[in-house]
Amino acid sequence: MFKKKWIGLILVLVMVVGLVPGPSVQAAVSVQDLRQYFDSVDTKNNGDWYKNYNNEHNDLAYGESFVMQAYLAMFEATGDTYYLDKFVDHAKGVLAQRDSVRGVTDHRGLSLPAWSSSHYTDDGSRVIYPIHTGMIAQPLAKFGAIVNHRPELASYRDEAAEFVQAAKDALAVFDANWYEDDKIAYLKGSGGYHKPFNMTLAQGDVMVNIYRATGETAYRDKAAKVARYFRGYLQLDSSTNSYLWKYSMKYSVWEDLGHAIPDLSFVYHAYLAGIEFNETDMQRFANTVAKKLIRPDGTIARRVDGSGNYSPESYISLFLWYDPWAPAIFDASAQRLLNRRYVNAAELEGVALLARAQAIRVGTFGQAVVPQPQPQPQPEPQPPAATKPDGSSGQELIVNGTFDAGRSGWLGSYGSVETDPDGNRYAVNDRNFGFSQKVQVKPGTDYRLQLDIRRGTASDKAQILVIYYDAAGNKLDNYSSFTYQPQGKDWETVKNVLSLPGNVHFVRVYLMGGNGTFHFDNVSLQEVLPGSETAHQEPGQDAGQPQQPEPDVLAPWVDLVLPEEGSYVGGTVGLRASARDNQGLERVYFAYTTDLNRPWVTLGDGNLVEGTDQDGSWELAWQAAELPEGELYLRAVALDQAGNVEISSPVTVKVDTTAPTVELLNPVTQELVAGNEINIRYRLSEAAKVNVTVYDEGGQAVAHLLEAFQEAGEYQIAWDGKVNGTIIPGSYTYAIAAQDPAGNQGKADGTIKVVEPNLIVNGDFSHDRTGWVGSYGTIEQEAGGNKYLANSYNFGFSQWVNVEPGTEYILSAKIRKGDATKPAKILVLFYNESGKSGAKAFTYEPAGNDWEQVEYTISVPNDVIKIRIYLMTSGGSGNHHFDDVNLKPVR
């Protein structure tokens, strides 16, 4: 439960943030104030947060890791070992959830000292992700870096040793996934492509902190290579003296705020360790946060180039490491964090980093901060309140009700402040609970609430909702609500009198649209002096009276889980969102846009596939071919049963429905003589994962030649014709399959005929008489250049061939009729160790004047080791022609 004694403090903080401009916010809050606020929101699961969860649904990576970071930051801010004790308790819980301790295996069947997740797999198999490993292991190593260098913390050395070793063990799971040379190092995926920067840098952050904890230079050296690798992709924006970088070296999209968090954590800790980055670098990274992610109008950008919109905006606080170089980060963070009764895990770290940054500012970093009792100021006598003609006190309670100062004083991340052509500024909002202001009031008092309303895109009524709170800041059951239907399209003034019950000390005023937007301006809340006015209802206005029960004003929570940021999509794509609501969700739907400044197009409603309507997962399958090619944005929208709406942060994807093409650069059919190699050459139209596989005549895969990610270009790969190490002559097909990052597939096929080597030397006579013995016969040449033998009846043209005893051979040749009077003859003489041992003669009478193919089987006796082949006629005069003589064993 929210700790009531801190309500007053939070109100002070809220007022400070809302009313005090610029750098003075830091001067107005103390470390002790922030500590008290931190303790008041460190309450989820009774302060256990996610320490007893596993990582099946990423609760450790994207939940508990932030909590552990928060406790370390609070120790640095206060010097109080209470937070180290909390860290130890949580860290031991996290170690108990490693796969090797739980006794579970990943998708490879391995049970390793890391934290796998089944959140992204369709079949429930577990995968150990590099980013999860980095985020969970980093605070374990950092604990050692803090403890091992402070003698007064010697009692924590055993835990430090245990946690640092656990961080080492977790990193070692990815040893085989690193590319490393003498200059750079980075995580690589299948096919050797570079993993996104956040994954490499998250693990680099662990290395830096292991080095800081142990002094082991191997971790320092590898972290330095990671830093040099990252530096190579940084771009300097000279207009703001800030750094820009992409999501990865492979994608054209700029890095987004969420993934920049581990990026810049690595840079900061590397800087502390004296690795690669200097003061100039730190100022440039700080400028990226303060001048790009925090835009001039105070809104938070999605990407490091200042484009897009990020939600939740409070995550800007996770860059407070850079507060010494950019104080604006503190103010932007305080405005978004110091008005909460509850925070999520990442925001808990943000609050801790506020305290840490303030401790650095006031010079108490790492020292115990003991609260000192403050004298209570005596109230100054106040003159009687002046009464305005309308009966109000004239003392305005709404901060920036004219919106001349933008969103200053107003809470929430919905709605916007626009400007008319005449320069007048006003608020625009639709139906949500994301635009409000909390105001302190007097119990049992009447207040005039007045504002101007103009119709925007809505066709129904605007709504003004006033929620009541008691002195401790707890919401009460009763509230006031009134709606207004504008009569035209111009500004119309609306007013109502709120008669507050005696237990109301604060109110929160929500400005809401309906089924579209309304415009709001000149919002005023002033006390009505006794006897001057009673409730007044304007035409078209529904008077508000306290109602019961209290409405559900809590917006749902929703996160677009799939596809992942920066991914390519094509074909059938599965959208997946996780969403929660305190009372139940009505629907979760998905939408896209090609430009964040243009309207969103709904893709359809998701189906609840896991969990309940209060906490579950929704999915929708859609066809990428229905969307425009190129970069677009996706989001999930959750609507609860009370009509509250929450929108996820947009995810950038690239739609690619064009399949890669694979073009063969060699003949479709090739012949491979056993004992040699043949090159398969191809051209790839775009970057893709390529598989080259050889199949036998039965369609069975017999050789896998390649599985790699290749950029567009020309390639070749060799095959030696062997199947399981043995040459088996026959006809084989090969397939070159290419799959691009979006899943589109292209393919090319070819045929390779594996043949035995010809034992006849120069059987085609292209080298004249080479390999042949004797002085008879002549080598002739046709008009097309083909050479052949012309021979008569004689024993003066032959070739010796070594053979295997007891083996069958196929003897083939082409024969063409010459002017001989007798048939052609091929004579084979057999020889054993003792000499000639027999003969085999084949005669053939050509039928015409063209080349004719002949083929004979020769069965070599068991004692024969060589043969002699003669090409001749069988007698008489004249000659016949011979060509393409082949001798091959029968397998």
Image (tube, rainbow, N blue to C red):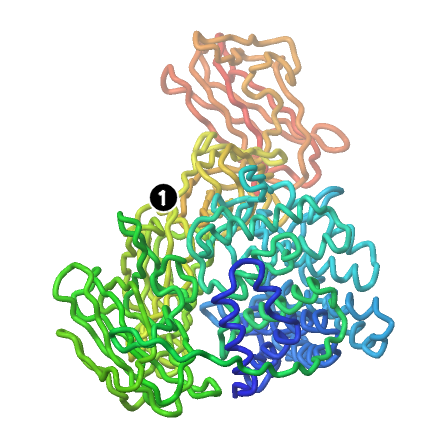
Up the image or down, 780 lies above or below 138; here it is above
In the picture, measured across the screen, residue 396 lies left or right of residue 457, that is right
Q: Is residue 694 visible?
A: no
Tell me the amino acid under the disc marked 1. Answer: Thr
Q: Is residue 25 visible?
A: yes
Which residue was labeled with disc 1?
658
Location of residue 314 in the rendering, given as x and y in whole percent from the top left corner: 50, 65
Up the image or down, 225 lies above or below 642; here it is above
Label 1, residues with CA under 10 Å away: few <14, some 14-19, many ≥20: some
In the picture, measured across the screen, residue 763 lies left or right of residue 696, that is right
Q: Residue at x 67, y 38 (%)?
A: 804
Q: Residue at x 48, y 32 (%)?
A: 670
Q: Residue at x 42, y 71 (%)?
A: 578
Location of residue 342 in the rendering, given as x and y in whole percent from the top left corner: 50, 78
> Quick one: SS at disc 1?
loop
Q: Quadrant of the C terminus?
A: top right
Location of residue 523 in the rendering, given as x and y in whole percent from the top left corner: 31, 68
